[in-house]
Amino acid sequence: MALRMRIELARLQEKHRLSFSAVELALADPVPYPVIVSGFASTADIDLQRTKFRPHALWWHSLPPLYLAHDETTPVGTVDNLEYDQRGRLSVTATVTHDAAKRCNGFSVGARVLEYEIRNADSADYYAVVTRAECMEVSLSSRPANPKALVTLRYAKPAASTFHDLMIARVQTLTKIVDHMQQEIRRQQ
């Protein structure tokens, strides 16, 4: 479905002789610690690819992974919260640990488009409205397709929270070790 939508949009772009280019957002200053970022992963605005998501069009089974510029080979942190606000904008809060990703001021969603409509096809003001899609990932980007999908808040992850995460990881490791030891004892009996 997404491929068909992209092909239709490419034909309309050629028909109306339009070209689009993303704007590079200024990068935040580098920091040596994890940061928590919040903002909008998606809004109901038409983006630079002539696509917009209808409010509440995106759904997800569980919180999606967090990437840098849709590069699935490198997770850059975790999406901690994803929900719609009262205006139908997809609000996101994420913990970011990757140095380059911590500096990005834009968001982007990777979605599996299930339903869409082309609007104003006979006009240079054409666009696609995604009416239903599955959110597969959220990315941080310095060049978001949607210029309104921005990081609006950034702060250092509290040390107590980092300590808590480390302690949880250590308890999980100890639990695995104890489980393994119990299995060994059972096997030897």
Image (cartoon, grey):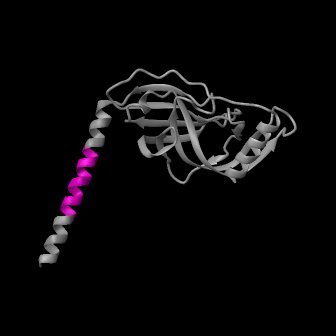
User: What stretch of residues is rendered in magenta?
Assistant: 167-179
State left or right for residue 21 relative to residue 143.
right
The x, y position of residue 108, in whole percent, is 57, 37
Question: In this view, which residue lies farthest toward the left?
Answer: 189
Compared with 16, 186 (above or below) is: below
Compared with 35, 75 (above or below) is: below
Residue 114 visible in the displayed image: no
Q: Residue at x 42, y 44 (%)?
A: 74
Tell me where residue 14 sits by quadrant: top right
Residue 149 visible in the displayed image: yes
Residue 177, magenta (yes or no): yes
Q: Main secondary structure of the magenta part?
A: helix
The x, y position of residue 173, in whole percent, is 23, 53
State left or right for residue 67 relative to residue 134.
left
Tell me where residue 87 sits by quadrant: top right
Nearest the eye: 57 or 20:
20
Question: In this view, which residue lies farthest toward the right?
Answer: 122
State left or right for residue 39 relative to residue 9.
left
Nearest the eye: 46 or 72:
72
Nearest the eye: 166 or 129:
129
